C-alpha cells in the first residue's frame, strides 16, 4: 500500500536508546522500523545494551562504510604516527558510539596518545567542538559523512585524516593508512575484525524481534526492492 511514514528522532547514548526502544518497547507488528549506529550489532559485547542483537529482525543496509580519525588542520597531531608520540583530545558520545569505540581502540590497542572527552550528543556537536578548539578531533567519522556533511573541511583543508578503518581501503584515500595495516599482532587483528563488523553493517535498518513472519518477509522484500530501485540509487 501507501503507508504514512513518520520519522521519530531518538537521541541518547550513540543510538543505544533507540535500539533499546525498537527491541523492547516498539510494537511487534511490523509497523515500526529503526535505523541506528552500526556499532549496535556488537553493542552487547561492549556496553550495557538491553537487547540481544542476534534477535532483531534485520532488514538490511544501504551501504558499507569506512570510518576515519580526523584532527583540525592546526591540531598538534596531523598524522597517525605523530599521534603515537604526541597527546591529543578526541570528542566522543557514549561508550557504545563509534567515536568512543574507535578512539578507545587506537588508544588501548595500538598505543595512540588519545584523551577521550565523552558526553557530546552526536557527531555534529563534536564537529563544532573541533572547529571551536574544544577538542582536537574525532574518530569514527564516516568518509561519506565527511564528504556529504562537512565538505568545507576537505575543500578548505581544515582537516587532517589520520587513519581509516573499513573492510576494504577507501580508493579515494590511497595515502591514508588503514587500521588493517597498523594492527601487527594477532590479538590486535582479532579485535579489529570485531569492530569492522560495524563497518560492514554501516547503515543498518531493523524491526523488533518476534514480528509475524509474513510482515517480516514483506519488510525485507520492500527493503530489497528499494535498494535496487533506479530512482533511489540515483
Image (cartoon, rainbow, N blue to C red):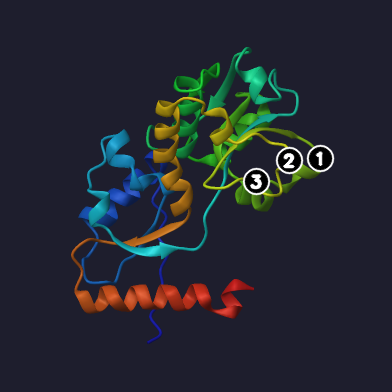
Q: Quick check: can you spot residue 93?
A: no
| In the foreground, 27 or 82 | 82
Within 10 Å of disc 2 (Cα), the crowding (few <14, some 14-19, many 20+) is some
Cα gap from disc 3 to disc 1, whole angstroms: 13 Å
The image shows residue 63, relative to residue 69, as above or below, that is: below
The image shows residue 113, relative to residue 155, as above or below, that is: above
Residue identifier under label 2: 153
Side (left or right) of 94 relative to 31: right
Disc 2 to disc 3: CB gap under 8 Å? yes
Residue identifier under label 1: 156
Q: In the structure shown, which secondary structural element does the residue marked by tag 1 occupy?
A: loop
Side (left or right) of 215 relative to 131: left
Cα gap from disc 2 to disc 3, whole angstroms: 8 Å
Cα gap from disc 1 to disc 2, whole angstroms: 6 Å
| Rendered-image quadrant of the C terminus | bottom right
Q: Residue, x 59% and y 79% (percent of image)?
A: 230
Q: Where residue 27 sits: x, y (%)?
A: 22, 65
Q: Where residue 174 sits: x, y (%)?
A: 71, 42
Q: Residue, x 60% and y 79% (percent of image)?
A: 231
Residue identifier under label 3: 146
* Earlier residue among tags 2 and 3: 3
The quarter holding residue 129 reads top right
Amino acid at each position: 500500500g501507501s503507508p504514512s511514514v513518520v520519522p521519530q528522532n531518538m537521541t541518547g547514548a550513540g543510538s543505544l536508546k533507540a535500539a533499546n526502544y525498537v527491541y523492547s518497547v516498539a510494537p511487534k507488528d511490523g509497523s515500526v522500523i529503526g535505523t541506528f549506529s552500526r556499532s549496535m550489532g556488537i553493542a552487547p559485547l561492549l556496553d550495557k545494551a538491553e537487547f540481544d542483537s542476534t534477535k532483531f529482525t534485520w532488514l538490511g543496509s544501504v551501504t558499507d562504510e569506512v570510518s576515519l580519525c580526523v584532527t583540525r588542520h592546526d591540531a598538534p597531531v596531523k598524522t597517525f604516527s605523530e599521534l603515537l608520540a604526541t597527546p591529543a583530545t578526541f570528542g566522543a558520545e557514549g561508550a557504545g558510539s563509534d567515536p568512543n569505540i574507535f578512539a578507545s581502540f587506537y588508544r588501548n590497542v595500538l598505543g595512540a596518545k588519545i584523551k577521550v572527552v565523552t558526553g557530546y550528543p552526536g557527531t555534529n556537536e563534536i564537529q563544532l567542538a573541533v572547529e571551536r578548539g574544544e577538542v582536537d578531533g574525532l574518530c569514527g567519522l564516516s568518509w561519506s559523512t565527511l564528504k556529504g556533511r562537512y565538505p568545507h573541511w576537505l575543500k578548505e583543508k581544515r582537516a587532517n585524516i589520520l587513519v581509516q578503518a573499513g573492510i576494504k581501503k577507501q580508493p579515494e584515500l590511497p595515502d591514508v593508512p588503514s587500521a588493517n595495516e597498523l594492527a601487527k599482532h594477532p590479538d590486535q587483528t582479532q579485535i579489529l575484525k570485531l569492530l569492522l563488523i560495524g563497518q560492514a553493517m554501516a547503515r543498518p535498518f531493523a524491526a523488533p524481534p518476534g514480528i509475524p513472519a509474513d510482515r517480516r518477509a514483506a519488510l525485507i522484500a520492500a527493503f530489497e526492492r528499494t535498494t535496487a530501485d533506479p530512482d533511489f540509487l540515483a
